[in-house]
Amino acid sequence: MTGDRATLSRRGSIIGVGGNAALALMKVFTGLFTGSMAILADGVDSTTDILTSVITWISTSVSNKPPDAQHPYGHERADAVASKIVSMIIFFAGAQLAMSSVQKLFTGASSVTNLALVITVASISAIAKYLLYRYKLGIGRKIDSSVFIADAMNMKLDIIISLSVLGGSIFVGITGLQIVDSIVGLIVSALVIKTSIEIFWETNYELMDGLKPDDNIYRIIFDALKRVPDVYNPHKVRVRKMGYKYLVDLDIEVNPRLSVSRAHSLAKQVEAAIKKDKENVYDVHVHVEPSGNVEEENFGIDSSNEFSHNDEQGQEIDRYSSK
């Protein structure tokens, strides 16, 4: 799995760097040549995409390293850290574009020539960005990489940006209202900033040892434990995610008359059952207690909790409580 991740991430990053570099050069030179603020803004956004692809490449290389003395759980959280960096780069690029667009908007300096070239370049960009979006999203889902998915979401935004530039340029050509180009540039910058905030927020779950509301890992764990005989009252279940790996801690109760060897065997069966149902569970730590044990314990999930996905309106209906 690690070898496949490394190969796919390296290939995806190289294609991302190459594709974005070609598009950035094309759009920046078009913007400078024609005076179009919208296509120039799109070009600057593609320039930041080169940097985000490089960061994606570096982070996935780091995350694929095996555990060591300083990082006993592995290096998978490099993806989440890299996603934060990507979001900040995108934010500052969007803010700079917004300031430039506002300046042109209020100074009335908009003057676009050769609209046919702008329209052609924007069309090529929209198609190319769609292909990059589908490619990177596919890799991100296959290797469960938050930074690749974040990069893909950025590509999805780029499609909207290029289509906005295309529509705005066509409108300028029809109406002659040059100010529309600056307005489109301002809208593009707002979309860039919005995406950066979404990416920044998305990685909070992993960095704070949380799980996304639609993650069904707890249901999978309790369903798996039902198949293990002589194991009672699984509780204090806590799961955290590092990159694509899940780390599980839980308590179980067993017959107090069992030997240590037999209790250990049941704990290993619990681990095997969970890993069978969820292949990217990296580690399961099982604490064994005698059945009927009662003590004050920290927060954790138990089988009395109700688990369900969000409803169609997106309202949260999961309910967790401690033992």
Image: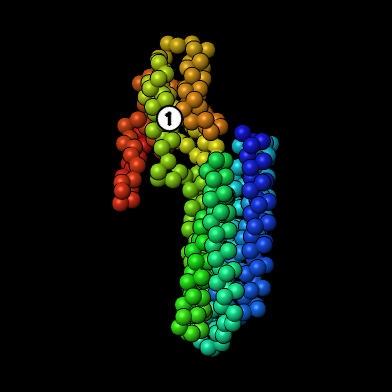
Residue behind mark 1: 221
- For label 1, the SS is helix
Relative to 286, residue 245 above or below: below
Residue 113's spot in the image, x, y percent? 59, 82
Relative to 4, residue 231 above or below: above
Position of the C terminus by quadrant: top left
Position of the N terminus by quadrant: top right
Q: Along the line of sight, which residue is nearer the eye, 75 or 120?
A: 120
Query: Can the viewer see residue 71 in this picture?
Result: no
Relative to 312, residue 172 above or below: below
Q: How is the image coloured?
A: rainbow
Q: Total of numbered circles in the picture?
A: 1
Which of the 4 image quadrants contains residue 228?
top left
- x 46%, y 80%: residue: 174
Residue 76's spot in the image, x, y percent? 60, 42
Query: Can the viewer see residue 182 in this picture?
Result: yes
Residue 303's spot in the image, x, y percent? 35, 30
Kind of residue indicated by mark 1: Ile
Does residue 304 appear to the left or right of 241 in the view shown? left
Q: Along the line of sight, which residue is nearer the eye, 125 or 254?
A: 125
Q: Residues within 10 Å of mark 1 (few under 14, many from 20)?
A: many
- x 63%, y 39%: residue: 5
Relative to 25, residue 239 above or below: above
Q: Along the line of sight, which residue is nearer the eye, 289 or 140?
A: 140
Does residue 68 appear to the left or right of 309 in the view shown? right
Does residue 226 appear to the left or right of 241 in the view shown? left
